């Protein structure tokens, strides 16, 4: 069955291929729960629990650091005990820790709970990369991830709309119901993960030599792979640009109405859902992935330039400029996502996907963590000059992927030829 056949949907909704169908259901559950909770998490701790907003933000930053650190040991555990088993346990822990939010009455309790949830969640995201490597055929892996990402955006949008009901009610009972529902969306998929079968070609993967078994941590010393990971992390900053930077930019620096932030988020979700599978199909080999990353960096630079132009324009033209910038950024987003998936797999040693995907996932988590501060001290604080600095950063990161990949592919000890 070809990669395209795997993505053929039964009844126009779910794929025919059994493993991808089950992964789609798992992704649907989990993404719905995340979308349900994300819009109201901070408000629950400030409005219902009564914590200071600044303290909550600091606690989430500390939790983010814990999440970045959790990815690599989680990947090591996946190599040793199996990615599906480890990810299932991590998601079960996420469910329990999320449910514990309902018991928080103090800042100490909040810190313990949010660190546990964030570390477990980010570790599970890193291990899911190894799960995909374990259960999806290599030929259709990147395209399948594009399809699953489309499901994530649709499910999170639906979850966010449902979460808005709790925001409108603004009662402790409403928040608690949402939190417990989110906890269930971790617990149910955790059980389903363990029943996923391995890909048929798994037996064709290189055997694990004794030297490899004794050196599972070598991914953190693999300098070419780390270079690609860092460059991908810089491009990942674009996600916080959309989620944090643009709302602040719209309110503080432009004449555009505040609802423009919601409009741009809708544009992003719709276009990613429409484009991601098609783009992933065209960036599933190393050369095409390198080109995709280069174009992503240049498009992000162009988007930064357009965003900068929105300052000082009339409300109508500011909305137009911001929307154009958002559309350009979507193309960069789907290109970089597909390119990053391909390089993260193809440059890794296939005998130790767990720790390699843990490293790559930790890099993405680090990019997400530093993104808000980076965008605030550049674009938001310094306006056009700050946008220019971000544009240069994105362009250089995208274009630098080519020499970094060339360096990585010169390594001769990898488990699979690239």
Image (cartoon, helix red, strand yellow):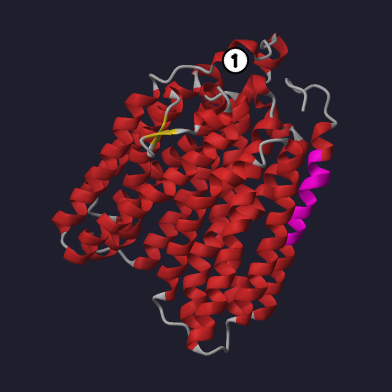
Q: Residues within 10 Å of mark 1 (few under 14, many from 20)?
A: few
Range shown magenta: 395-405
Give residue 185's position: percent from left, percent from top: 30, 38
User: Is residue 397 magenta-colored?
Assistant: yes
Give residue 158's position: percent from left, percent from top: 32, 52
Magenta region, main secondary structure: helix
Q: How many marks overall?
A: 1
- On the image, numbered disc 1 is attached to which residue? 201
Name the residue nearer the viewer: 308 or 245: 308
Q: Is residue 251 above or below residue 289?
A: below
Q: Is residue 254 visible in the rendered structure shown here?
A: no
Q: Is residue 154 above or below residue 50?
A: above
The residue drawn where x is 70% and y is 27% is 218
The residue drawn where x is 49% and y is 33% is 7
**Disc 1 secondary structure class:** helix
Q: Is residue 265 left or right of residue 286?
A: left
User: Is residue 274 magenta-colored?
Assistant: no
Q: Is residue 385 above or below residue 104?
A: below
Give residue 329's position: percent from left, percent from top: 59, 62
Name the residue nearer the viewer: 374 or 231: 231
Residue lying furthest front: 11
Q: Is residue 258 left or right of residue 224?
A: left
The image quadrant where one finds the N terminus is top right
The image quadrant where one finds the C terminus is top right
Name the residue nearer the viewer: 333 or 119: 333
Q: Is residue 319 left or right of residue 291?
A: left
The residue drawn where x is 50% and y is 79% is 319
Q: Is residue 272 visible in the rendered structure shown here?
A: yes
Name the residue nearer the viewer: 269 or 2: 2
The residue drawn where x is 63% and y is 81% is 309
Q: Is residue 101 left or right of residue 307?
A: left
Give residue 72's position: percent from left, percent from top: 57, 34
């Amino acid at each position: 069955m070809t990669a395209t056949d795997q993505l053929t949907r039964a009844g126009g909704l779910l794929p025919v291929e059994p493993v991808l169908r089950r992964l789609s259901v798992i992704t649907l559950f989990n993404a719905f729960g995340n979308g349900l909770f994300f819009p109201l998490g901070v408000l629950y701790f400030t409005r219902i629990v009564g914590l200071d907003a600044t303290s909550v933000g600091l606690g989430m930053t500390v939790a983010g650091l814990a999440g970045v650190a959790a990815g690599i040991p989680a990947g090591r555990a996946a190599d040793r005990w199996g990615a599906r088993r480890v990810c299932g346990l991590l998601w079960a822990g996420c469910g329990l820790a999320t449910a514990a939010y309902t018991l928080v009455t103090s800042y100490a309790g909040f810190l313990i709970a949010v660190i546990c949830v964030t570390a477990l969640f980010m570790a599970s995201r890193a291990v899911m990369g190894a799960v995909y490597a374990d259960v999806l055929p290599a030929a259709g892996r990147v395209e399948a991830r594009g399809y699953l990402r489309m499901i994530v955006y649709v499910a999170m949008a639906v979850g966010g709309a449902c979460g808005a009901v709790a925001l409108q009610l603004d009662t402790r009972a409403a928040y608690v119901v949402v939190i417990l529902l989110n906890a269930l969306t971790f617990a149910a998929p955790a059980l389903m993960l363990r029943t996923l079968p391995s890909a048929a070609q798994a037996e064709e993967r290189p055997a694990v030599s004794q030297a490899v078994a004794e050196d599972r941590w070598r991914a953190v010393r693999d300098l070419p792979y780390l270079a690609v990971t860092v460059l991908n992390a810089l491009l990942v900053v674009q996600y916080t640009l959309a989620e944090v930077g643009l709302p602040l930019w719209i309110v503080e620096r432009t004449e555009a109405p505040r609802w423009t932030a919601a409009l741009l988020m809708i544009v992003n979700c719709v276009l990613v859902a429409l484009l991601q599978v098609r783009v992933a199909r065209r960036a599933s080999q190393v050369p095409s992935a390198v080109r995709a990353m280069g174009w992503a960096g240049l498009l992000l630079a162009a988007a930064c330039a357009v965003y900068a132009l929105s300052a000082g324009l009339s409300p109508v033209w500011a909305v137009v400029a911001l929307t154009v910038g958002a559309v350009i950024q979507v193309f960069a987003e789907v290109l970089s996502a597909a390119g990053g998936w391909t390089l993260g797999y193809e440059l890794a040693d296939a005998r130790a996907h767990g720790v390699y995907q843990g490293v790559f996932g930790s890099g993405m988590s680090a990019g997400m963590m530093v993104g808000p501060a980076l965008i605030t001290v550049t674009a938001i604080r310094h306006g056009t000059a700050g946008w220019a600095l971000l544009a240069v950063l994105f362009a250089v990161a995208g274009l630098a992927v080519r020499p970094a990949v060339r360096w990585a592919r010169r390594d001769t000890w990898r488990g699979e030829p690239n």
